[in-house]
Amino acid sequence: MADSPSWDLLADLQLLLRFHFMQNAFVVGTLVAVLAGAVGYFVVLRGQSFAAHMLSQVGFPGAAAAVFLHVPPLVGLAAFCSAGALGVGVLGRRLDAGNRLESAVVGSILAFSLGLGLLFFRLYAGSVQAVYAFLFGTILGISDRDVAATAVTTVVCLVVLAAIARPLVFASVDPDVADARGVPVRAISIAFLLLAALAVAVTVQIVGTLLIFALLVAPAACALQLTARPTRGLALTVVLSLLFTWTGLAVAYFTIYPVGFFITTLAFGVYVVIRSAKAMSGRSVGEPA
Amino acid sequence: MFAATSFSLNPFQDLQSMLAYDFMRNAFIAGGCIAAAAGLVGYFVVLRNQVFTTDALGHVAFTGGMGGLLVGLNLLVGVFGSCIAVALAIGSLGGRARGRDVAIGTVFAWVLGLGLLFLSIFTSSHSASAGNTGISVLFGSILGMQPAQAAIASVAGLLTSIALLAVARPLLFVSLDPEVAASRGVPIRALTAFFLVLVAITVAESVQAVGALLVFGLMVTPAAVAQNLTTSPYAGMAVSVAVAVLAVWVGLTLAFFIAYPVSFFITALAFGTFIVSLALSRGQKKGAPA
């Protein structure tokens, strides 16, 4: 922040990683980008970006409650997001923004949970900065404890995701045939929602509740525009997600402006470029919703 | 915030002590007018399945308000201007912002990110307390309204309600059966655009009352309660307005005596009413096949 970047990239990198909080931010950012990319690919493939949006806002009071109770914010986020995911999963229906009553119900839950988050922050007499950090993300204040918790969560999630990846692709692409072949579609769907909840919980640490789309959905949306093959798409998603996070963190460090702005702008910019490039090249492939 | 006055067992006296304050009177009048407009417009928002247009406009309101402050305009000018501009843009793109949720979500995440940038530039170029301005746009500031703001909000709320009631019949027709309405010569495009402008004004007003993030609590939850309780449109509008206005007034009263944020009380009351209405409608449907 006080330092200005030069053209010497190596020196810049040294500046960037000079402080402990930036090392933590980069470690957490990297873990987040990998997990959010991998899970986000399936979120977009399954058309559940709306559910992801909902889970992130349900997480906000969780983070606030955790601060209030002096436990790591990730614990509160994970608890609230998982509860939300179980609720969605047990209701058994896919959340659909196009359905009139469902969208009204979800809208009501979102407003209430953000209001509840506000209450917890006031109870704690938390600073304005803490509210902004959970809404929009931050590069400051990621503690060693957060790094450890994020690492454990990421590794567990990635192992589970790898274990269910094949049936998950099958169940996402063709649920009826998968069901007929004996794939436990419902169980896999709930398991995946829980994974998504945990991915949302760790991602909120970097980009905040409100900007979750930038890391969880935008990279996968870009990748799915470029390739339909799962392995390649998955790899591309993780690469884009890492690119957005690292660049966002670095630029935020050298300027005084918030990381959330840079990550969303990168995500939006790359998405727009890919969409326009495809529109101009004239190939029309249906966009996954 | 203002737990200076403690609660007695005499409700009349409590009311008197509460309404002795100018800011509480302003909040009651402005909040009531805003809530009436939000209940009415919100009923059609839910009926027409445009809940996420409201969400999008709430995000725009934050960015517009912050952008307005940054270039030295009044906060309200930015909020109203950006909401109306985006509503007109959505209207010209075909009337509803939904369906392609990935594209829309990415756009509006960026809009919020931009608002965050404006906020941080504004905060760093002003005193540190400027950060609270952002919080009050996000979570509402009904108790901090200046008399002039309250008067503008009240008039805007009343005018919006009257305008909506004036077009309620054709709008209902268009919302429920667009094809037949078109064949009967109802000007669908004009009506849709007009309705979106009303939505934009209502969102901009609701931002003052409950904040950009909690707009749903005032515009969608009361309408969802109405949908649960009645299928008749006019009864539904009445229920929606009643729930919205009561949530605001009771919320203000609670916040006056208990020092927690008024936006929390308003959203919690609306949500509680919604849960009760859900239980009631489930109870009625019991026996009938689901």
Image: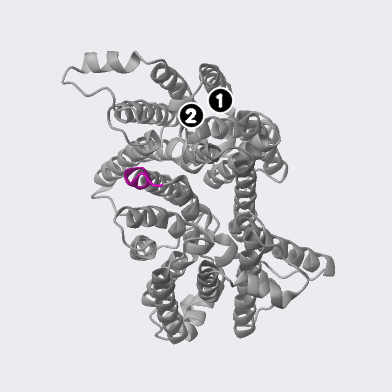
* On screen, residue A275 above or below B39: below
Residue B148 in which image quadrant: top right
Q: Amino acid at mark 1?
A: Leu
Can I make out residue A59 in this image?
Answer: yes
Give yes or no for residue A24 being in the magenta stretch: no
Q: At which x and y percent is residue B113?
A: 61, 52
Task: Report the front residue among B151 and B289.
Answer: B151
Task: Report the front residue among A22 and B146.
Answer: A22
Give the residue at mark 1.
B164
Which chain contains the residue that carries disc 2? Answer: B
Give the residue at mark 2.
B40
Mark toward the start of the polypeptide (2 vs 1)? 2
User: Which contiguous range is marked in magenta?
Assistant: A120-126
Which label was assigned to residue B188?
A: none
C-alpha distance separating marks 2 and 1: 7 Å
Q: Does dot 1 land on a helix, a strand or a loop?
A: helix
Residue A186 in which image quadrant: bottom left
Q: Amino acid at mark 2?
A: Leu
Can I make out residue A224 in this image?
Answer: no
Q: Residue at x 64, y 66 (%)?
A: A250
Residue A147 in which image quadrant: bottom left
